[in-house]
């Protein structure tokens, strides 16, 4: 039996083999922690390598080194590619791609995500062959232009950036740099958010669409210049390879370059170009070079989009089936239908991938893409023209080349701001399970493979697809009660979930993690599919308990997220009046109801009851007047103690003793300080497990050894967020199951 499209079959088999090898834990096929080439006795090392990528931001610069070595006692030890972060003021010498450099600093493994939903640096960098991170303290260029090709590319990039900025200005120039060069350092958070809200973030990435437009545009230009088909094809393919390298050689760019080269080869050899076979070949080659691309969102989105156009579109919308009139309206309708059918085909493949990696969807993305996508080609060409003309003296030619792009970008920004004002613009979906995604794709594949027609067949296909979509959006609670203690560095944050409908947050802040609200707390909520937080309890006004909450409220007010917060539960304390009023004002602007609670206050939701045990009055200091919250659901109980101490702690102990309150899990007070959680409290509560929220290498030495000894003396289970990442307690009605993100791995 002859296999149709053997490359497609080979690609699926190859992906399955790589997945199975990844399950074995082998370094090359998995995300296992790398071993250093030599035992490192000290934290600080000297690393050398050739710069192959440079990303400049407001205050820091990231350099990526290949052909890297550790220099220890004048000996070289080869090591995988390194990401180096340097403060801009420490870059005393100008450095470019291709320069051989030496950096002194702290070497670490690329970290894993310490919370569910958090951006996983390891999942992003490992497919790109970067396995080490070095925070640079001293920097030196050993030899300029070590790699001439990389150096030339860097010079072209720098000149193009200058030309684009000259032609488009600062704001729009940042968008064009991202689209044309893959440079996102000057994109700006506001513009990035607008494209996210519109569901058009793919426009900002160097994608296959970008290279296809430019590649075929360049080829047709060469043909019109009377070059032979062979010469034009070879030059266009070479130009695309160079451009792919220039823009960073991402998965989408490499895929597009390979497919373009195959299409040119088919044209020159006068062979039929098979879209799916070319796509499969590019997948095989990319996964052979880096198997971990199999788990990479950029790889999956790029290949998924092309697969939608190549496999779904011809089946659902067969070409030539629908006839159009030859008048103007007929032509417009044909183009409109083509856009709609293409979007549906791509969306059918990308929907589970987008939900799995990003946990939310643009509500209006489908319609916005219909408006935007027809203009992307013109925008790209205008961006390149403006960048090239910007290198010439004078401003007139540069602005003339950039004018179409400027007008299109104004159109994009206007649409984005209009969508942002709509009542609903981003829909939090949560992260589907793998089996839900596989079930969806199984149903979709079945629909595509069934060739029979008829009303009953169509109705069956429609019912099956509807069921698959409904199942994809369903979220199944892990237990009757789930409490997650998030890793926010030196700070506190916990999320309480009852089933899938009730959610409360206790604290949210950090003194060591920048923008913990935006990058740690909010991603967790989105990953869990939480669209509405019923209430946020703020134990007291210290920054490491509240600044993340302020971030989230500010994002809600400025319509940067689809999350809603119903209520804020605060406590009065005279010495933190100013901070409390600031939080109260932020809450009101975000649409929250404000409640003040004290000893004896109760909040109930079904079987879940939250009782405030402290503070008794507003005369207490900030720490001693922390909210102490007793969480109970039938036979399961937890106690949250904030930073309580002194008189407040004594009152809480007395109350627990008199009311005979026990708890299964104790959230240890004050991040595990020496004097927190005394023996008397442990005697009264008799907890089975203790959770300590603190940051790695914090200045306070938390948790203190004396506290750990007190807990160990009672043979309690001890969980630390700095060691294990997010800690979750799931109660199923009979027992509590404790899980955690990871166990800390250390360079020895």
Image: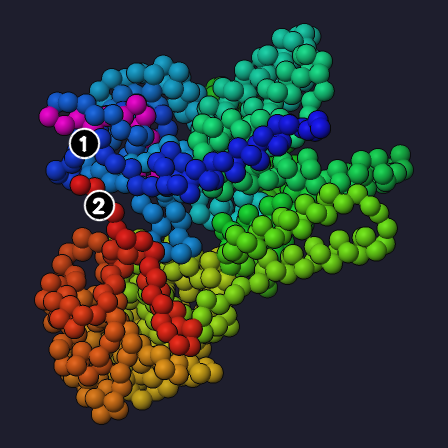
Left/right of residue 185 with respect to residue 201 in the rendered view: left
- Nearer-the-camera pick, 706 or 743: 743
Residue 78 marker = none
The answer to if 43 sits in the magenta stretch is no
Q: What main secondary structure does the magenta stretch of the protein show?
A: strand
Query: Residue 327 placed where, x, y %?
Result: 89, 36
Identify the residue shown where x is 63% and y is 12%.
Answer: 232
Residue 746 marker = 2
Left/right of residue 55 with respect to residue 105 in the rendered view: right
Mark 2 and mark 1: Cα distance apart in space: 14 Å
The answer to if 68 sits in the magenta stretch is yes
* Residues rendered magenta in the picture: 57-73
Category of crowding for the residue at label 2, using alpha-carbon neighbours closer than 10 angstroms: few (below 14), some (14–19), many (at least 20) = few
Labels 2 & 1 near each other (Cβ < 8 A): no
Residue 38 marker = 1
Which type of secondary structure does the marked residue at label 1 adopt?
A: loop
- Nearer-the-camera pick, 585 or 51: 51
Category of crowding for the residue at label 1, using alpha-carbon neighbours closer than 10 angstroms: few (below 14), some (14–19), many (at least 20) = few
Residue 127: quadrant of the picture? top left
Query: Residue 686 placed where, x, y %?
Result: 22, 79
Identify the residue shown where x is 54% and y is 40%.
Answer: 300
Above/below status of 497 relative to 317: below
- Quarter of the image where the C terminus is located: top left
Query: Residue 617 placed where, x, y %?
Result: 24, 86
Identify the residue shown where x is 60% and y is 46%.
Answer: 350
Q: Is residue 145 visible?
A: yes
Above/below status of 509 relative to 345: below
């Amino acid at each position: 039996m002859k296999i149709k499209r053997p490359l497609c079959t080979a690609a699926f088999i190859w992906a399955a083999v790589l997945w199975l090898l990844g399950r074995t834990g082998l370094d090359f096929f998995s995300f296992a922690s790398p071993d250093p080439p030599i035992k490192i006795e000290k934290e600080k090392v000297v690393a050398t390598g050739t710069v192959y990528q440079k990303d400049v931001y407001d205050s820091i610069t990231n350099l990526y080194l290949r052909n890297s070595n550790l220099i220890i006692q004048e000996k070289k030890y080869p090591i995988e590619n390194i990401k180096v972060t340097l403060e801009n003021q420490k870059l005393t010498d100008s450095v470019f791609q291709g320069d051989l450099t030496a950096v002194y600093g702290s070497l670490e493994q690329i970290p894993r995500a310490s919370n569910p939903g958090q951006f996983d640096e390891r999942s992003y960098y490992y497919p790109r062959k970067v396995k080490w991170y070095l925070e640079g303290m001293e920097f030196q260029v050993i030899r300029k232009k070590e790699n001439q090709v990389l150096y030339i590319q860097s010079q072209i990039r720098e000149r193009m950036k200058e030309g684009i900025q000259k032609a488009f200005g600062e704001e729009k120039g940042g968008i064009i740099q991202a689209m044309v060069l893959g440079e996102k350092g000057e994109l700006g958070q506001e513009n990035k958010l607008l494209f996210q809200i519109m569901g058009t973030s793919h426009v900002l990435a160097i994608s296959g669409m970008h290279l296809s437009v430019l590649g075929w545009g360049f080829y047709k230009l060469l043909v019109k210049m009377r070059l032979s088909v062979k010469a034009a094809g070879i030059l266009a393919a070479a130009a695309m390879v160079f451009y792919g390298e220039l823009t960073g050689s991402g998965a989408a760019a490499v895929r597009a370059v390979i497919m373009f080269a195959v299409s040119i080869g088919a044209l020159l050899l006068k062979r039929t170009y098979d879209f799916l076979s070319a796509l499969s070949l590019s997948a095989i080659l990319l996964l052979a070079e880096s198997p971990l691309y199999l788990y990479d969102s950029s790889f999956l989105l790029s290949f998924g989009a092309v697969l939608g156009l190549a496999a779904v579109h011809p089946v659902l919308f067969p070409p030539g089936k629908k006839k159009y009139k030859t008048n103007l309206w007929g032509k417009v309708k044909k183009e409109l239908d083509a856009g709609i059918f293409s979007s549906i085909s791509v969306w059918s493949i990308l929907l589970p991938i987008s939900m799995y990696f990003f946990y939310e969807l643009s509500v209006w993305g489908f319609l916005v893409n219909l408006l935007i996508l027809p203009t992307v080609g013109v925008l790209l060409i205008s961006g390149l023209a403006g960048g090239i003309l910007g290198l010439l003296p004078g401003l007139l030619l540069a602005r003339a080349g950039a004018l179409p792009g400027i007008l299109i970008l104004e159109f994009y920004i206007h649409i984005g701001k209009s969508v942002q004002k709509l009542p609903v613009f981003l829909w939090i979906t949560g992260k589907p399970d793998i089996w839900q995604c596989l079930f969806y794709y199984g149903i979709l594949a079945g629909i595509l493979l069934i060739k029979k027609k008829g009303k009953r067949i169509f109705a069956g296909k429609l019912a099956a697809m509807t069921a698959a979509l409904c199942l994809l959006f369903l979220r199944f609670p892990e237990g009757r009660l789930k409490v997650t203690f998030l890793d926010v560095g030196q700070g506190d944050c916990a999320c309480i979930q009852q089933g899938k409908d009730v959610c409360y947050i206790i604290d949210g802040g950090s003194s060591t993690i920048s923008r913990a609200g935006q990058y740690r707390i909010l991603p967790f909520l989105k990953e869990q599919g939480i669209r509405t937080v019923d209430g946020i309890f703020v134990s007291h006004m210290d920054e490491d308990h509240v600044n993340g909450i302020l971030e989230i409220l500010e994002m809600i007010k400025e319509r940067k997220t689809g999350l809603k917060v119903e209520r804020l539960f605060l406590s009065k304390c005279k010495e933190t009046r100013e901070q409390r009023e600031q939080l109260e004002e932020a809450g009101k602007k975000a649409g929250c109801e404000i409640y003040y609670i004290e000893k004896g206050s109760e909040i109930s939701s079904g079987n879940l009851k939250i009782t405030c045990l402290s503070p008794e009055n507003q005369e207490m200091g900030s720490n001693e007047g922390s909210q102490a919250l007793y969480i109970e659901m039938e036979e399961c109980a937890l106690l949250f103690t904030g930073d309580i101490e002194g008189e407040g702690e004594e009152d809480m102990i007395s109350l627990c003793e008199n009311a005979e309150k026990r708890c299964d899990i104790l959230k240890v007070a004050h991040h595990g300080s020496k004097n927190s959680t005394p023996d008397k409290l442990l005697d009264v509560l008799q907890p089975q497990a203790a959770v300590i929220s603190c940051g790695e290498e914090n200045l306070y030495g938390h948790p203190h050894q004396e506290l750990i000894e007190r807990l160990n003396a009672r043979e309690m289970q001890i969980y630390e967020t700095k060691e294990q990442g997010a800690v979750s307690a799931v109660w199923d009605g009979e027992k509590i199951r404790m899980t955690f993100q990871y166990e800390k791995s250390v360079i020895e």
